[in-house]
Image: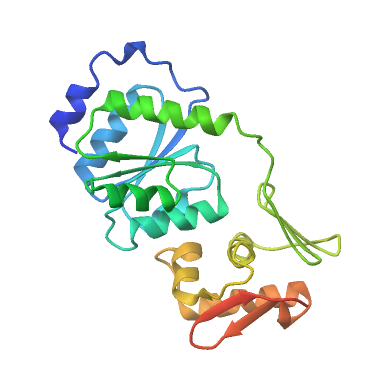
Amino acid sequence: MSQRTVTAGTRGLKSFHSPPGPWRVLVVEKDQRAMETLQADLSRHGYQVEGVHTGSAALQACEDIDIILIDLELPDIDGLEVCRCIRMVSDVAVIAVTSWGSELDRVLGLQAGADDYMVKPYGCRELIARMEAVMRRVQVQPQSAKVISHGSLRIDVGLREVSLDGREVDVTRKEFDLLCLLASNPRTVVPRKRIMQQVWGDSWSRRTVDTHVSSLRAKLGGSDWIITVRGVGFRLGHA
């Protein structure tokens, strides 16, 4: 998205309603200039804007965000995969923003979990209108916290609490993220690489994952809660 396109698109925006709150926007954009331009435009219209350049950083920063604007062409993780990962653990509004404009690209973006899809270049007025439309749809939905139950294991995603047989289990932030990822895919082996990218982003090592798995098993009272699939990754089990 060029500077010229965004600047021209911001004219006449006074008729738009100011975002309530204000909304917290995460911009995921690999191009520094495009990111700075979009951040400046949205900030001028009352949004709280945070920007990141990679998919792994987006997965780390998406908590406590109201809406995500994500470029699908990212340098580390495929943008569609990032959308899928976000959607598995969050109902946050997502708009895919990319230069990929074919019908198939749009279909894949929406199937990956995006609420809307915009093709570059675009005007800022249209972007804000689409953001408002998406947020209206999101806000009318019941705001009940997501709870994942797996046998005697209960994970409250909204409160970030874990309980087993009614007893609260004290877990760290990363232990919760790891357990939540496995519980969101209860009958699937989650590859180690995906765990590393989604839970730890760029700062991880093989030992880090193994240490957290071992700690979780101890806190849950049994190694059968997290099953190792050698050479692939981990899956949720039963004690």
| Residue 91 placement: quadrant | top right
Report the front residue among 77 and 49: 77
Task: Answer yes or no: is residue 71 visible.
Answer: no
| 93 horizontally vs 179: left or right | left
The residue furthest front is 103
Identify the image quadrant of the N terminus: top left
| 72 horizontally vs 161: left or right | left
Q: Where is residue 97 in the image (x, y as percent from the top left)?
A: 30, 42
Report the front residue among 6 and 106: 106
| 184 horizontally vs 151: left or right | left
Task: Answer yes or no: is residue 33 visible.
Answer: yes
**Residue found 46% across the figure and 22% down from its top:** 19
Up-down relation of residue 61 to residue 118 (above or below)? below
The residue furthest left is 4
Up-down relation of residue 32 to residue 59 (above or below)? above
**Residue found 52% across the figure and 31% down from its top:** 137
Up-down relation of residue 205 to residue 36 (above or below)? below
**Residue found 49% across the figure and 82% down from its top:** 232
Q: Where is residue 183 in the image (x, y as percent from the top left)?
A: 64, 65
Q: Where is residue 194 in the image (x, y as percent from the top left)?
A: 46, 69
